[in-house]
Image (cartoon, grey):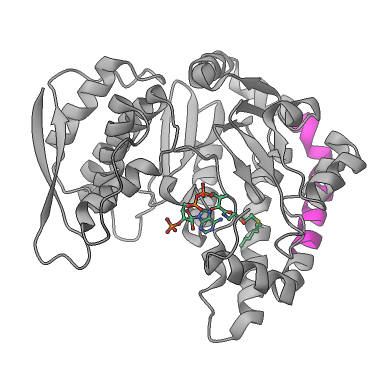
Amino acid sequence: MGWEQIEISLPNCSALQVISFPVVQLHLNRTAMRASQKDFENAMNQVKLLKKDPGNEAKLKLYALYKQATEGPCNMPKPGVFDLINKAKWDAWNALGSLPKETARQNYVDLVSSLSSSLESSSQVEPGTDRKSTGYETLMVTSEDGITKIMLNRPTKKNALNVEMYHEIMHALKAASKDDSAITVLTGNGDYYSSGNDLTNFTDIPPGGVEEKAKNGAILLREFVGCFIDFPKPLIAMVNGPAVGISVTLLGLFDAVYASDRATFHTPFSHLGQSPEGCSSYTFPKIMSPAKAIEMLVFGKKLTAGEACAQGLVTEVFPDSTFQKEVWTRLKAFAKLPPNAMRISKGIIRNREKETLHAVNAEECSVLQGRWLSDECMNAVVNFLSRKSKL
Ligand SMILES: CCCC/C=C/CC(=O)SCCNC(=O)CCNC(=O)[C@H](O)C(C)(C)COP(=O)(O)OP(=O)(O)OC[C@H]1O[C@@H](n2cnc3c(N)ncnc32)[C@H](O)[C@@H]1OP(=O)(O)O
């Protein structure tokens, strides 16, 4: 195994610094959803062949995934604050938490594949068309074997949804609804599925002040949730780890929810001075009974994967060690079914609810707009951002 030297520069560093990646020569099998050791080694080789520098963020992700895939969870002492390069590497690796080696290997292969296509295609991209399926900042989107996979890709932030990610998910869903895949899958990269709305979204106040901020947030949320309501093909969530806030509420709009037994489901809206969204005020009472929905959405009760399955929010739970393998095997079989039949059957089941769901969505967004201006909400956000509180 040789070593490829890849340069990384960090803010406040006067010179380019160097991170090394191990590289071996082999061939990439892109059709496998589950990366073999051979795929992994091929991906390492492909890194060497990248024509353009993928940037520091991508290189740190590659480093972290490589370490996780080969050594498991971060086992190095934390570097000092002035050791910027090693601290950045340590942070990236440590953020992967207890992500299984096999998942890290798969994510590494996916990342290299997405970097290869985006860097190769960037020279052919027309001006203004920078949101091709391979050119996302916050997602990894791949399409193969009849399955479009949308992977939330901010693992160091626990896949919190920033404004960019809301827009990119909408874009990816619209593209997936028109592509030739049979089913679409949403999942998370790293140890979390998603920690929900990025609370720093609240910090960027426009000239119109907090009222304008709240209004824009409500418009964005309504459009975002609307894309899930209207999605025409089978939409499947692979909940690979803990899920918080909007990443949980949206599950009521998915057609199947497969969860790792590491996943938890938490909607701490009252703790945050907020109120339910994602149509959960309508879907959750129907799925699990009003009393159980109130335990989650009003009292913030966190459910295990097993509990969420017992209450109908999750379709099936898998041991984390076999989660990826078992679910992808199943999804590949689903994707071989006639796509038009699946689309039409989904429509028959879902379409009569659509109007109601859009009305619920509008009402929830309007209520939330008011909540975001409340002292209760502002205090909760300030407490999180000043590191005084976490969930
Ligand atoms: C416009 C549409 C609005 C739709 C509204 C939706 C409502 C919701 O979704 S409500 C849910 C909001 N989410 C939260 O309140 C979660 C806040 N995060 C946490 O409590 C914790 O981070 C955690 C329990 C999820 C994880 O704790 P852990 O100790 O394991 O990791 P951390 O060190 O805290 O996280 C690593 C890194 O990631 C940042 N981060 C994580 N989640 C968020 C988030 N939701 N918003 C912003 N940033 C988040 C965290 O700050 C750390 O960043 P640094 O490494 O830079 O410190």
Vertical side of 238 occupied by 95: above or below = below
| Residue at the (61%, 42%) spot, across then down | 243
Evaluate whether residue 230 shows in this view: no
State the image coordinates of residue 11 (x, y, percent, origin top left).
22, 65
| Residue at the (54%, 32%) spot, across then down | 240
State the image coordinates of residue 210 (x, y, percent, origin top left).
63, 80
Vertical side of 198 occupied by 104: above or below = above
Evaluate whether residue 339 shows in this view: yes
Decide which of 15, 75 is in the foreground and name it: 75
**Displayed-image quarter of ligand 1:** bottom right
| Residue at the (56%, 63%) spot, across then down | 199
State the image coordinates of residue 360 (x, y, percent, origin top left).
82, 54
Splitting the image into 4 quarters, where does residue 316 fall?
A: top right
| Residues rendered magenta in the picture | 347-365
State the image coordinates of residue 143 (x, y, percent, origin top left).
43, 30
The chief SS type of the magenta part is helix
Decide which of 217, 231 is in the foreground and name it: 217
Q: Is residue 357 found inside the magenta-colored segment of the image?
A: yes
| Residue at the (46%, 52%) spot, across then down | 157
Splitting the image into 4 quarters, where does residue 38 fall?
A: top left
Vertical side of 135 occupied by 322: above or below = above
Decide which of 349, 304 is in the foreground and name it: 304
Please indicate whether residue 3 sits to the left or right of residue 214 in the image.
left
Q: Is residue 84 found inside the magenta-colored segment of the image?
A: no
